[in-house]
Image: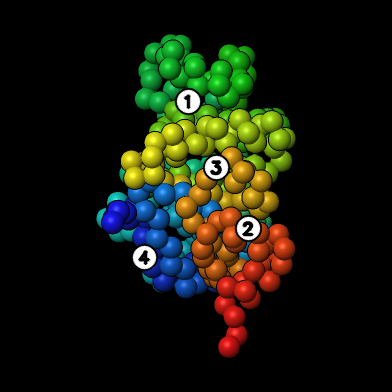
Amino acid sequence: MVVVKLLLEITDLAVEVNEKEILSDIDLYIGEGETHVLLGPNGSGKSTLFMSILGFPKYKITRGEIIFKGKDITHLSTTDRVKMGIGVSFQNPPAIRGVKLNDLLKMEHHETGKGLSPELNALVKKLKFDERFLERDVNLGFSGGEVKRSEILQLLAQEPDFIMFDEPDSGVDIENVELLSEEINVLLDKEKKPGLREKSGLLITHLGYILNFVNADSAHVLMDGKIACSGNPAEILEDVRKEGFKGCVECCNPIH
Ligand SMILES: Nc1ncnc2c1ncn2[C@@H]1O[C@H](COP(=O)(O)OP(=O)(O)OP(=O)(O)O)[C@@H](O)[C@H]1O
Ligand SMILES: [Mg+2]
């Protein structure tokens, strides 16, 4: 029997934003090397869970705990969580005026030289950026697709152990979804056999199209701030497509 070591353990989590409870009774366990998918209708709390795991101060944890790599991080700062190996691709990252993408990438890849290392340059090319683009302020005037590609490029430079992707496929054309998926697979160690993968992820998606290219081990449906259903990603997606989110959840929790 293969025993999966847990990387992220969320127990009985409740979260408030502006004194309103958005999430409650959240239990989520992600093993080393596993990729989980989070589905749910608009406003169900997916980004709130993402931000709470990242530790943004606005998201107040009122109950429960988050354990990462065996350490209680429930009240740890975002900076410390990132130092422990958590990386993210935001749904709507802010523009950072005055900070060039070039400089951010070098910082994330721990480089201090004038130019980029050959390794970093290769990643830049893979994500279809050129040197002139890297001179631009982060996300300032980037197109929707450029923002998403830039987020994935930064993660490749950073090499985190646990990566959360908040709708990396939204607003991205089909060709670029395939390109991003390829790199998400690299980030999540998918080229290795399941038992040998070291990277784990939580992938938030609406349409599930990206799951044609990125294999996931488990899926969860968030409804009204609670995990209403968990299981096999392909089965859950099929249910959601056929029955909608409400139908899927009813099917998951039949009334006897
Ligand atoms: N700063 C805030 N102040 C008040 N309410 C908030 C705040 N942030 C989030 N919410 C509310 O929390 C609920 C969950 O929002 P969240 O962004 O987590 O949903 P989501 O599942 O990510 O939706 P989407 O699919 O549209 O991205 C929404 O009703 C939202 O309005
Ligand atoms: Mg969201």
Residue at left offset 58%, top offset 30% = 150
Of callouts 4 and 3, which one flags the residue occurring earlier in the amino acid sequence?
4
Between the residue at mark 1 and the residue at mark 4, the CA separation in whole angstroms equals: 32 Å
For badge 4, the amino acid type reads Glu
Structural distance between the alpha carbons of marks 4 and 3: 29 Å
The circle on residue 65 is 4
Residue pointed to by mark 3: 214
User: Residue drawn at (58%, 88%), measured in percent from left and top?
Assistant: 256
Q: Is mark 4 within 8 Å of ligand 1?
A: no
Three-letter code, disc 1: Leu
Tag in front: 3 or 1: 3
Q: Bin the neighbour count of mark 2 within 10 Å (Cα to Cα): few under 14, some 14-19, many 20 and up.
A: many
Dot 1 corresponds to which residue?
Answer: 105
How far apart, in angstroms, are the residues tagged by discs 2 and 1?
A: 35 Å
Tell me which numbered mark, 3 or 1, is placed earlier along the sequence: 1
The residue depicted at 35 percent of the width and 49 percent of the height is: 32
Q: Which one is closest to the eye, mark 4 or mark 3?
A: 3
| Circle 2 residue | 237
The location of residue 142, given as percent across then percent down, is 68, 30
Secondary structure state at the residue bearing disc 4: strand
Q: Confirm or deny contact between disc 1 and disc 4 (CB under 8 A).
A: no
Callout 3: few (<14), some (14-19), or many (20+) C-alpha neighbours within 10 Å? Answer: some
Quadrant occupied by the N terminus = bottom left
Report the Cα–Cα distance between label 3 and label 2: 14 Å
Q: Are marks 2 and 1 in contact (CB under 8 Å)?
A: no
* Residue closest to the eye, 140 or 197: 197
